[in-house]
Image (cartoon, grey):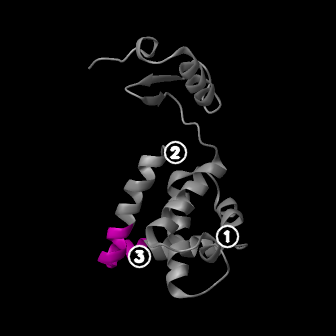
Amino acid sequence: MEIINLHRILPQSLKDEIHKCVSEFASENRYRIIFGQVIVSEPVLGKNAIFQVIVSAVCDYFKVSETVVLSRTRKIPFVTYRQMIIYFTEQYMDITQEDIGIMVGIKERSSISHSLKIINTYINTDKKIRYNIKRLDNIIKMMIVPK
């Protein structure tokens, strides 16, 4: 593997701009640029950003609006999508069920616990939902680093 030296191929103004943009998200010593990709040695997404990535991934995958999924609607497909968001939030973030409830807009911790139980039941019994969960898990893994 050969590391491309940015000093040889990029003008100085562009190198400065790249480092300025990257340094907003990662500290100066925590990243390297290799083959046009930024390699970061530590996760740079905050908790709200991770939650937003999860919500966006689920809503984009099923082609539904984020506002509808996170609303208090009780229509079956939207409830299932919201439960998937709760499942992935619990998987990828190190926060309590009460905090997940606040982020999703559900006040009771027992509703979060029930949602996790329902999704785990679906994973064990429903092939279509199991397939969708695996695909979404791969998509989310590419975007964020697990806890």
Residue 97, percent across and down? 64, 62
Which secondary structure lies at badge 2? loop
Q: Residue at x 48, y 43 (%)?
A: 145
Residue 96, percent across and down? 65, 57
Q: Earlier in the sequence, mark 2 or mark 3?
A: 3
Q: Is 4 situated above or below 103?
A: above
Q: Is 50 situated above or below 6?
A: below
Q: Amino acid at mark 3?
A: Thr
Left/right of residue 102 with respect to residue 43 in the rendered view: right
Q: Residue at x 34, y 73 (%)?
A: 124
List the single residue furthest toward the left: 1
Q: Earlier in the sequence, mark 1 or mark 3?
A: 1
Q: Quadrant of the N terminus?
A: top left
Crowd tier of the residue under label 1, counting other residues whose Cα lies within 10 Å: few below 14, some 14–19, many 20 or above: some
Q: Amino acid at mark 1?
A: Arg
> Could you say which is closer to the camera, residue 132 or residue 116?
132
Q: Amino acid at mark 2?
A: Lys
Q: Nearer the viewer, mark 1 or mark 2?
A: 2
Q: Is 98 situated above or below 21?
A: below
The picture quadrant where one finds residue 85 is bottom right
Mark 2 and mark 3 in contact? Answer it, CB < 8 Å. Answer: no
- Check disc 3 and report the residue beneath it: 121
Q: Is residue 121 magenta?
A: yes
Q: Nearer the viewer, mark 2 or mark 3?
A: 2
Mark 1 and mark 2 in contact? Answer it, CB < 8 Å. Answer: no
Q: Marks 1 and 2, how far apart in space?
A: 21 Å
Q: Which residues are magenta?
A: 120-132
- Check disc 2 and report the residue beneath it: 147
Q: Give the number of the disc on residue 109.
A: 1
